[in-house]
């Protein structure tokens, strides 16, 4: 499986409810920022869309104290969920969303 396929599989797994926001953010960050070959696998539009999501996911925090001590730095679960929805919508509108499913189920 390519890094790009892993990225789309992560979206499928989140959509299926198999990842919570925190785990999704951790996995997305690993794929986007630590898989060097991913950049060559994504189209320019995909890179732009996932970069938007990655910047938000990378600054996700489940801790209320982070929002009090560092206002405007971190994103809440709800803000991340909205960014994920925007990502799905943009990818689908552009015909870029590639579900990684076998026999109707996420692999």
Image (cartoon, rainbow, N blue to C red):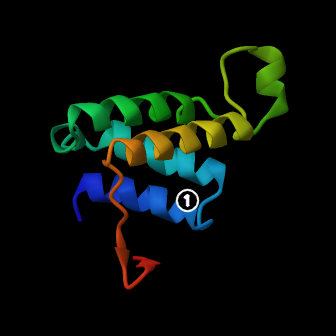
**Quadrant in which the C terminus is drawn:** bottom left
**Residue 85 image-quadrant placement:** top right
Q: Image height check: is 106 above or below 25? A: below
Q: Is residue 95 above or below residue 32?
A: below
Q: Could you tell me residue 73's position as x and y percent?
A: 66, 17
Residue extending farthest to the front is 93
Residue lying at 53% horizontally and 33% vertically, measured from the top left: 58
Quadrant placement of the N terminus: bottom left
**Which residue does the image show at 48% across and 34% down from the upper left?**
53
Q: Position of residue 37 (x, y in %)?
A: 18, 43
24 vs 63, left or right, is: left
State the residue at coordinates (29%, 59%). 5
Give the quadrant of residue 34: top left
- Secondary element under disc 1, as helix, strand or loop, is helix
Specify whether 90 is left or right of 1: right
Q: Position of residue 63 (x, y in %)?
A: 78, 35
Q: Which residue of the protein is positioned furthest toward the bottom in this rendering? A: 103
Q: Residue 94 is drawn in which quadrant? A: top left
Q: Give the number of callouts.
A: 1
Q: Whole-percent x and y of residue 75?
A: 67, 29
Q: Tell me which residue sits at (54%, 38%) in the image.
A: 86
Density class for disc 1 (Cα within 10 Å; few <14, some 14-19, many ≥20) is some
Query: For this rendering, which residue is in front, 71 or 45?
Result: 45
From the image, tell me which residue sits under label 1.
Answer: 14
Whether 101 is drawn above or below 98: the answer is below
Q: Horizontally, is 10 left or right of 17 in the view?
A: left
Left or right of residue 4, residue 86 in this image: right
């Amino acid at each position: 499986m390519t890094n790009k396929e892993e990225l789309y599989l992560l979206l499928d797994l989140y959509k299926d409810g198999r990842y919570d926001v925190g785990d999704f953010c951790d996995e997305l960050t690993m794929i986007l920022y630590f898989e060097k070959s991913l950049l060559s696998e994504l189209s320019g539009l995909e890179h732009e869309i996932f970069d938007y999501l990655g910047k938000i996911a990378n600054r996700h925090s489940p801790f209320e104290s982070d929002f009090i001590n560092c206002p405007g730095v971190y994103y809440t679960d709800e803000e991340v969920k909205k960014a994920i929805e925007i990502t799905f919508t943009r990818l689908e509108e552009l015909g870029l969303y590639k579900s990684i499913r076998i026999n109707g189920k996420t692999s």
